[in-house]
Image (tube, rainbow, N blue to C red):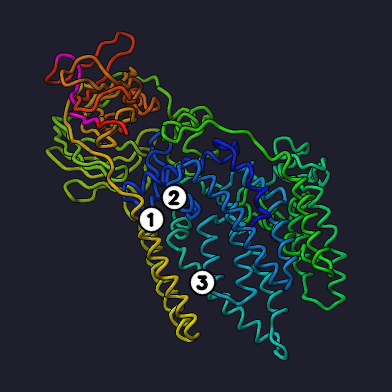
Amino acid sequence: MLLTLPALWPLGRPGYWRSDDGLIHLFRLAALRGAVEAGVWYPRLFPEFAFEYGFAVFHYYGPLTYYVGLLLTGAGMGIVSAMKGAFGLSLVASALAMWWLAREVWEDEIAGLVGALVYTYLPYHLADVYRRGALAESWAFVWWPVIMWGVWREHWGATVLGLAALVLTHNLSALLFAPVLVVWWGVVVWTRRPAGTSLWPHAAASARRLTAAVGLAALLSAFYWLPVLLETKWVLLAGDVGGRGFLRHLYPWSELISRSLVYRYVPDQQVAAEHPLSWVHLALLLALLPAWWRWRRRGRWPSGPLLVLLAGLLFLLADMSRPVWELIAVPFGMVQYPWRWLGPIVLLTALLSGLVVPAGGRRARAGLVAGLLVVVGGSSLPRLATGTLAVEPGRYPEVMWAEDFRLQQIGATWTAEYLPRWVREERWAVPRPVNRPDAGPVLPAERARLVSATPWRYELEVELRAAAPLRLHQFYLPAWQVWVDGRPVPTWPSTSLGLVTATVPPGRHRVTFAWRTTRPVAAGMALTAAGVALGLAAAVWWARTGGRGRRERLLLVGVASALATALVVGAFPAGRGRFTPASVAVGDLAWLVGWQQAPAEPRSGQALSITLYWLSRRPTRQNYKVFVHLTGPDGGRPLAQSDGDPGGGYTPTSRWVAGELVPDRHRLEVPDTLPAGEYLLWAGLYDFATGERLPVEGREDGRILLGRVVIRPSE
């Protein structure tokens, strides 16, 4: 653990470090935290992503690592500190896992330390954390050695949990690890068979146990991977299956080796390859062959197959491997970048580095560890720093939308892989105004009122003169279901944005939009429940047949898990906001059908989050502004206000279509000089060019009285 401290130093700097995907993971953690506070512990959909059109991130992306960050926020950390802690824990845990594996394989404490050191400081591992900001892949480095140790010791509990955790962390890393696991199993069968035992019966028995472990791990993680397997066709992610994008990232060997002794990370690597091999890594690789030959002559365990596999993975980085890549494009084309093989390459290099540990005195061999730390760390660390970002997690999700708008991206991703395939609008154009005629379909509504609202479920009361489509401000996915008076009705994607849509008949109705459990999700959850039952039965049997010590350990784990669960649940109280139904017509443009406030009773100096819910009555080419004002009890001049385009500026009214239910977030900064007491909250729409407000039924000043807000004294 002490050896990892130099690798952790960038995390100790103030602020958030600059990386490729670090902000993306920060936004996902903020979304998860918000969902848990709303009472949704596994949100497959992040409704506020993609400018509040929604991305089903956890429906397709492994969720496990974000719960590490969630635990840290439950312990009192802020979002930024928790995300830095999640990355830091991955470095420490991966070093411990490799130390545990290598010391057992080599039966040598110093070899374990060397393996852990090499595993931590080879540049690709550090680049994964600091340059790429790849949270899931950084945790894959933890589970790989855990699984290998479980196979080595025939500890099938560790194997099962490690495999399930790997799938729930990063399915592509599980795919990359598959050939390593197969070769490793073969090495273990050959090496660990009892003396006097025939190879083939022993191999067959071991294969049955490993197959059972893989099967149980598949059951435990089925709630995640089964929907991915069956429902990827809904989104652009399906295009990665069998894709050929990896061909653009194959280079000659001259471009795969760093030209600097002090490693230069992308984008300053000085060669074409994004993540070239460092000279220290190359030196270790060259030292393995003669070291293996010495071990082989001593009759030690057969590491030759691992060296062959390592050479094969290195071969896949070079352009000469194109014919092989064409053969394995399905399924390995899904990894997108050949340099992702560097993860297993670092894994094998670290384990096999035990070959170069000489026999001799403890002091001399400990000196080897110190020397390696200086050499490997001295090569990898000096150019690791990437600068810092100014992040305002308290202004989430607006900061996420602003970043997407700046980069012309959508949903806090680079490839829009979770964008539903029926969205026809260019992603860069989604948050921008459109030029459309004022004439168009009009919602034939006599009245409308939102009864309840959460980001995953809306209940709307409407009275229609004629049948009309109602739309949710969410990208359509088949998991969205609509009920009219309790009866399900067909849904489909409408408009160029593919909005969730259903036709409502004339008359007075209650319409419910809800994210539901699909059949693949239900099947996956059932398989996981079966896996949990099998796992518990196996654990009880293992404890009962293993004596008192095993029973006590099992009981201790159960009690600790129950206490941890109780603490986590208690750290995230649900229902911190307050929803108020409304039914106010604003000109002929829209109905204000409800509003939500959080926190329920803010303090002076605290930001107040206000979400207005508009039901559009007709399209318009005009981009009206929204105002939210806080006034005294007399309704006079604003004491705090928020003016701007709806949806944080990314859902202009020219994008509204008839029958669309639009959530509209506003952030109201309550002055710290404002005395505690009761205040009035107002809202409305106006033309920015003229300052004229749209008329509001029942008032002449164009203001909608939302209600009263109680301001408490500042702490």
Looking at the image, the residue that sits furthest to the top is 690
Residue span colored magenta: 700-711
Which residue matches tag 1?
568
The local crowd at label 3, few if under 14, some if 14 to 19, many if 20 or more residues have their Cα within 10 Å, is some
Question: Which of the 4 image quadrants contains residue 150?
Answer: bottom right
SS under mark 2: helix
Which residue matches tag 3?
215
Query: Most prominent secondary structure in the magenta stretch?
Result: strand
**Of the residues under marks 2 and 1, which one precedes in the sequence?**
2
Which image quarter is the C terminus in?
top left
Which image quarter is the N terminus in?
bottom right
Picture coordinates of residue 709, whole percent (x, y):
21, 30
User: Which residue is found at the position 36% from the left and 51% from the top?
Assistant: 571
Which residue matches tag 2?
70
Between 74 and 243, the one lying in front of the other is 74
Report the amino acid beneath label 1.
Val
Report the amino acid beneath label 3.
Gly
Between 579 and 318, the one lying in front of the other is 579
Picture coordinates of residue 572, whole percent (x, y):
35, 50
**Of the residues under marks 1 and 3, which one precedes in the sequence?**
3
Picture coordinates of residue 67, whole percent (x, y):
46, 53
Q: CA distance from mark 1 to mark 3?
A: 30 Å
Residue 123 in sight: yes
User: Which residue is found at the position 69% from the left and 83% from the top?
Assistant: 193
Q: Are marks 3 and 2 in contact (CB under 8 Å)?
A: no
Residue 587 in sight: no
Between 72 and 398, the one lying in front of the other is 72
Asked whether, in this view, residue 318 is left or right of residue 90, the answer is: right
SS under mark 3: helix
Asked whether, in this view, residue 561 is left or right of residue 342, the answer is: left
SS under mark 1: helix
